[in-house]
Every structure is written in C-alpha cells, then in structure tokens.
Amino acid sequence: MLKRNQQGMTLVELMIAMGMGLVVILAATTLFSATVGASSISTRMTVLRSDLNAIANLIASDVRRTGYSANASNNFGKPACTSDYETNCPFVFKPDRDLSASNNCIIARMDANDDGVLDINTNEVRGYVFDNGIIYQMTSFTGTPACDGTYTRESLSWQTDLTISNLTFTYLSGAASSGIRSINISVSGYSGATPELTMTLNQEVRLRNDDI
C-alpha cells in the first residue's frame, strides 16, 4: 500500500496566521475609531462656532446701528452731546452710560422709525447682558435704559446646548482727531455636552453713527 504525505498548515502556522489576522483587524478598528472620534470633534466644533457666530452677529448688528437718527446731522459737534446727551442726543453711544462697569453689558439705541424721538420700549433700544453662563437680550425697560437699571430679558442660549463662559465689550476710542470709535465683542463658550471643547470669537464693530 502506498503511503501518502499529507499537506497543509501545521497547528503552529495556523496560530501564527490567526494572530497576524487579529493584529490587522485591531489596527483597522483602531484607525476607524480614531477617524470617527476626530470627525465627531470636528462636527461639534463646527456647531459650536456656528452657535457663537449667531449670537455675536446678532449683537454686532445692533451695535453697528447704534446712534442712528433721522436727524443725525443735528448731533454732530453739538456741545450738548458731551454734557446733557440723555436729553439732546439720546441715540449717541456713550460708554459711561451704555456700557457696564464690568464690560459684560451693552445698550444700543437707534431711531428705528425715523421720528427723532427715542421710544424706549420698542425696538429702538436693545441691550445684551451676560449672566451666569447665559447671554440675555433686554426686551423692555423701566425708566431710563441702563445696564444697572430695571428690565426684562430673554435668553439667547441654553446651557444644555451652549454654555457661555465669557462675554466682553471693549470700547476703543481711537484717535481724537479722527473721531473713529469701535466696540470689540469677545464671546467664549463651550458645548453643553462636551465642556472640554471651548472656543472664543472676537468681532470689532465700528460705530459709524457717531457724534463727530
């Protein structure tokens, strides 16, 4: 009877092949997990940037319009704008009146209906304030609009989705000869689900309706 030699992998060779296969699978799984994690972080940062931009742009749009008046030419160069501006130049932005001492609140005034009169509890006075992780929009005022006054407010952010860690308004007076003034808006925050992901946005807004 003829003796036939059996061919194939030995047990040792089979175990080595299986081990190499497991190494390849582990490497592929690790790479996939890293890719998914990086993609998730990128998506969350994009959402965070979008949320902060939306708030910063809303505030900037009102700051950009502050000082507008149908009779704005009457405000330019008037001594009253430096002294009794509350009565004579109610729309002109004045940092000692319209910014809080802590620089986390701002009041914007504008002559939205072109009647030359400041109508307080309409859309002619808008304010924004940062308080305990949330940015609020002031919707109505009791008496003279002021950061330290009495007002009602509505939240612009919810901490479950977005927590604001800082909101700062910095007044930049510029050169006295040019009269160019601006406000730098700095807003920082993080996603409510991932507090380790933080971002800060800065936007400088020129006050074009000025009391030159």
Image: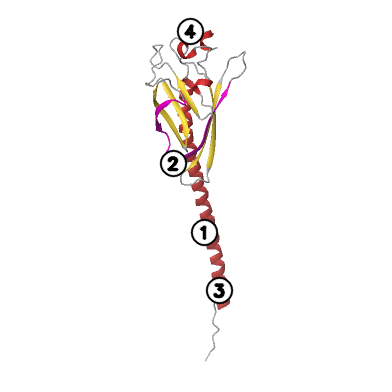
Foreground tag (3 vs 2): 2
Mark 3 = which residue?
15
Q: Quadrant of the C terminus?
A: top right
Which amino acid, by three-letter code, is at mark 2?
A: Gln
Left or right, residue 179 beside residue 149: right
Mark 4 = which residue?
74
Closest to the observer: 189 or 38? 189
Foreground tag (1 vs 3): 1
Name the N-terminal-most of marks 1 and 3.
Answer: 3
Which amino acid, by three-letter code, is at mark 3?
A: Met
Mark 1 = which residue?
29
Q: Position of residue 155 (x, y in %)?
A: 41, 34
Name the N-terminal-most of marks 2 and 4.
Answer: 4
Numbered mark located on residue 159 in the image: 2
The correct choice, above or below, for 160 with respect to 175 in the image is below
Element type at mark 2: loop
Q: Main secondary structure of the magenta part?
A: strand
Please provide the residue range marked out in magenta.
147-172
Distance between mark 3 and mark 2 Cα atoms: 54 Å
Mark 2 nearby-residue class (10 Å; few <14, some 14–19, many ≥20): some
Tell whether position 162 is magenta. Answer: yes
